Amino acid sequence: MADYIRPATLADAVSALSAGPCTVLAGGSDLYAATGARGLSGRVLDVTALADLRGIAATAEGIRIGAAATWAEVAAAPLPPACDALRAAARTVGGVQVQAVGTVAGNLCNASPAADGVPPLLALDAAVELLGPAGARRLPLAAFLTGPRQTARRADEVMTAVHIPAPALAGRSAFRKLGARRHLVISIVMVAARVAVADGRVAQAALAVGACSPVARRLPAVEAALAGAAPAEAAGRIADAAVAAALDPIGDVRATAEYRAAAAAELLRRAVAEAAG
Amino acid sequence: MNRPAPRLSFTLNGAPAQVAADDPTRRLSDVLRETLGLTGTKSGCDAGDCGACTVLVDGAAVCACLMPVARVAGRSVTTVEGLATDPAMAGLRAAFLRHGAAQCGICTPGMLAAAAALLAANAAPSPAEAEAAIGGVLCRCTGYRKIVAAICDAGRPAAAPAPPPAGAAVGARMERPDGPPKVAGADRFGADVWRPGGLRLRAVRSPHARAAFALGDIGAWAAATGGVAAVFTAADIPGRNAMGTIPGYIDQPVLAERHVRFRGEAVALVAFEDDGADRDLSGFPVTWTPLPALDAPAAALSPGAPALHDARPGNVLAAGLVRRGDAAAALAGAAHVAEIRIATGFVEHAYVEPEAGAAWMEGGTLVIRACTQAPAMDRDETAAILGLPPGRVRILPSAVGGGFGSKLDLSVQPYLGLAVLRTGRPARMTYSRTESMMATTKRHPAAMTVRAGCDAEGRLVALDFDGVFDTGAYASWGPTVANRVPVHATGPYRVPHVHARARGVYTNNPVAGAFRGFGVPQATIAVEAAYDRLAEAAGIDRLAFRRLNALRDGDATATGQVLAGVGIDACLAALEPRWQQALAEAAAANRAGGPLRRGVGVASCWYGCGNTGLPNPSTIRIGITPGGRAVLHQGATDIGQGSNGVILQIAADAAGLPADAFDLIGPDTHLTPDAGKTSASRQTFVSGRAAEAAGRALRAAILRQANAGEGARIALAPGAIGIDGARRIDLAALPVDADGYVFRAEATYDPPTSPLDADGQGVPYALHGYGAQMVELSVDTALGTVALHRITAAHDLGRAINPTLAEGQIEGGIAQGIGLALMEDYLPGRTENLHDYLIPTAGDVPQVDSILVEVPHPEGPFGAKGLGEHVLIPTAPAILNAIRHATGAEIDRLPALPHRVLAAIRAAGGAG
Ligand SMILES: Cc1cc2nc3c(=O)[nH]c(=O)nc-3n(C[C@H](O)[C@H](O)[C@H](O)COP(=O)(O)OP(=O)(O)OC[C@H]3O[C@@H](n4cnc5c(N)ncnc54)[C@H](O)[C@@H]3O)c2cc1C
Ligand code: FES
Ligand code: FES
């Protein structure tokens, strides 16, 4: 049986966190799935009543996604085309029931190597905002995710928002997810590609691959190879070997390591073709 | 921290509701079911994976198992019970009934909730929108197509359908009689009924595939752990500590004694107080000594391998053989020979309802209410385990949320019986999803080698089949698989020289048992692949090759049985138009190039209905009450397949009464005569024949009483039977028998078969059903992914007693065949949940065009044959044949996951 609190203000949330270790509860789609019990146990801090954690809005510096925004809210938000990959990913996290409650922060804090939210946000140069008794801080998403199911979040911190900087809102993005069935499927591989075209040439390319390394990764060497390409030729510049060199996939019940690397390259080509097209 | 208010208020199905907020993080599903008694919301996984618990919170579909109850404070919750009384949902419920969208019905509450959320936003959804809306709700029975159709058709006014008149029930698309409670959330499954204040049982199970174990100080553990009422071990079992399904093969301990043979085997049973507290087994005193496990038949068959069971050195459980002619010589002389080696994995039944039940004493009788496919077998087995005479055990089958073979075996029954008998208190037991997957049976993995040969004209001359089937740690239905496979190995084709062997081999893997088709689906994958190669070698169209070789009336099978009523060529012929068109479309699409390659594949099935060369009688009773109602004692458990409708339709027409004159008495070992088990596609045929005979006998008795002629029309009225609309029998004037009937008929039918001899020769089945399916798909040659476009399925079922139910069986069987072919792989310790063990979702089953072929069989009721297992047999081989047609890829290990397909494409030198 849990000791449960659902504060309405950040101040109350922080004071609960400073009183000792808490399980932070958002949508619960990871937390409840992980227990066979009738409920949760220990001290539980429910963040879903915190107005500061809700909402998706344009800010002076870019876009702020409240940490407790649900995937359904992300999918429905009027975001610019650079966020198309994120919105597409939102529509593939579980089924509608999971999208109705599952949150962006939950996906990032849970830090599964197969978290579908991560590659699109990496391709958007996203940063996460954390708040604890010691105050607020921001970390690039890539620095926040430190390993499979490991993050830089301190035990007394709560994630409050995800920020997308304005420069990363250039261009369009696309998402590709590969699984062994149509709905409700954990990714074998998923990729996000964001491409900005200027003067008929690729000016910015941001590529990220998930489920092919302990933590989803950007692929800077492959991105560099796209710079200056004509949009129609960009996908063709993605070489299998360069993608494989940038990743570190494992073999498991869903696929072999070699397959993952090969599929990642192919999915990147398709995502780039869509984003650049 | 602030403690929350002690009560939590919300709106439940339109009315104010309050619950104690003692644990605000309790799952909403648990509060709905346990605290509020709304058991219409189902629990299939407690992990968000099945969607059975879907409810509406402020109109949005959510999984109640993932929602802390505190989160609904001040909000509005709608469950299936609320939808059932919502006039706006009447159209949806009627559409579900009309389309046969609820088979077992366990997924129906979640489907209705997901559909309601969609319809509130979009009153006329497209099929794609409906499919996306139910993408998070799993159904294992229907194949989803009828659910999608029903959702799209929910706008039609909900007029009650006119019941078919007397004599017109057979062949009618009658709605299933048990449908209304299913769409109202009122059907009660295994976990839905229990006596309060009793015990809640949990089994302690092995985490190791093979281990010795020692139990520690159980008394101390129980004293230190809250709420333990009793703990039982093997020593407490009063009767035979062994369960199984086939005499001579009863080898699985109910509770293991000193060592365990598979991961998931039970070693102790803990009875907790059923007081709402969350109990767990942590710290239970057992010390495991893991031992090296035999993890595959190859290891178990290797010389010097330890015997799993002393009685079977060498680890061979059973071997089946069919030998006719000289296969080796015929293969040596064949113009073309094809050889296939292919292996399949464990497949989990994955019904949405995990095993569950409750039990209590009624006087001296132990009553066990649980989900089952075989009530009479449950009674006899449980009685033997508990040392009771069978008459003191009463089995009340609950509504069954899917079975597919696994619920033929005992699960919770002996544990419930043991606890109730020893404590005198009521008890209930519900397996968790992982427990259900670990502890119950699976489809046998098969490693098969096939050599088939034909002459220069493409006529099959010989087949050599060798299959090793991993039967796991205990026998279950392994002997049945070993016997059925060789008998069916040729498929429905004329093959003069046959040598077919199948062995069931013990390993330390999960127990493999009965699963829709008893090994025949696996064998068909290998054999139909070989036939495709032969057709190609002989330069004959693959469908034409099958028609050339199809069995015809008067042909003898590999067991020497001479057949009548053979419908395979009619099925293949029915595919012909679509086949030609599909081949042309695929060729045209492939000319365009690109990574997508289209392919078309075909495969056939045949399947003997009933036990293989063994008696398997069914008895059906019908009575007429003095009040003028007909009562059908229907003991054939309906696990969703539709016996409640089919048996009624047959009985009604045989009696010459309208179907709505009947009341059903469902299976109950105290009230219904034994209609045998629901397996082997036998209920429509065997119980149907008994129902037909009972109906005719009843009619004869009535006509005799009225002194009326054969053709007289009879009609039931309150207190009377009308004859030809002119005369009437006054029922009040007739004597009433012990069961309260004025007329009564009971009939037994046992199909005429003969046992097989040492070479597998004999007449194993009274009749067979036939079918053929073709699959159109495309393969992404760069990724190895497969997209199914369309499946055309022609099945000869003799007579379609109820075409809607028949189509439902076909679509559901196809969905399971898709899972077998493309995604399902049960790996102990790794895919023990519905997150990692993937079954098809609504988006994975393409358009299915069913063609019902009716070649009557003289032995079947109204000519009908069985269908339930046939339908999944051709799907997987047709898919694999289509993948090869598209890409040249030869898959040698199922499921054909993308990485395997891509590797096979590359091995074949194809694109990618
Ligand atoms: C059936 C099913 C299907 C799924 N399919 C997918 C899928 O396809 N792709 C995918 O990526 N995921 C999938 N998931 C996983 C899950 O739904 C997502 O990761 C979701 O985004 C988690 O969000 P949540 O709010 O529900 O997390 P919760 O369960 O509430 O929390 C998850 C973790 O994050 C922590 N946390 C949550 N919010 C905060 C915060 N604000 N600050 C600090 N810590 C926090 C929690 O303490 C916990 O450790 C699936 C889950 C289920 C049950
Ligand atoms: S019980 Fe909630 S999704 Fe399965
Ligand atoms: S009807 Fe859907 S699971 Fe049985």
Image: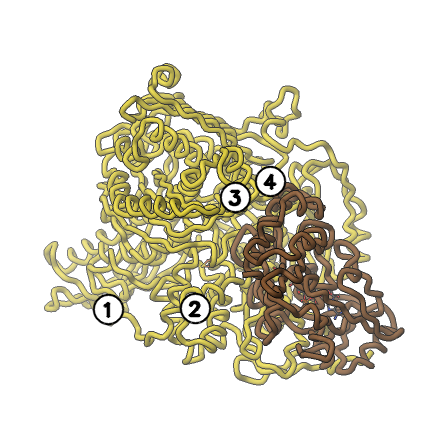
User: What residue do we see at 39% from left, 63% from top?
Assistant: B178
Residue A141 spot, x, y in % from top left: 75, 63
Chain B: drawing colour:
yellow
Circle 2 residue? B183
Mark 2, secondary structure of its residue: helix
Quarter of the image for the N terminus of chain B: give it: bottom right
The chain under label 4 reads B
- Residue B244, label in figure: none
Mark 1, secondary structure of its residue: helix
The mark that comes first in sequence, 3 or 1, is 3
Whether labels 3 and 2 belong to a single chain: the reply is yes
Mark 3, secondary structure of its residue: helix
Residue B164 spot, x, y in % from top left: 23, 64
Q: Nearer the viewer, residue B176 or A155?
A: A155
- Residue B732, label in figure: 1
Tell me if label 2 and label 4 are in contact, CB under 8 Å. Answer: no
Calculate the distance from the C-alpha at mark 4 to the C-alpha at mark 3. Answer: 21 Å
User: Is B906 left or right of A187, judged from the image as shown?
Assistant: left
Residue A108 spot, x, y in % from top left: 72, 63
Tell me if label 3 and label 1 are in contact, CB under 8 Å. Answer: no
User: Is B769 left or right of B290, judged from the image as shown?
Assistant: left
The mark that comes first in sequence, 3 or 2, is 2
Task: Single out the mark in the foreground, 1 or 4.
Answer: 4
Circle 4 residue? B510
Tell me if label 3 and label 2 are in contact, CB under 8 Å. Answer: no
Task: Single out the mark in the foreground, 4 or 3.
Answer: 4
Q: Amino acid at mark 3?
A: Glu
Circle 3 residue? B381
Label 1 environment density (alpha carbons within 10 Å; few <14, some 14–19, many ≥20): some
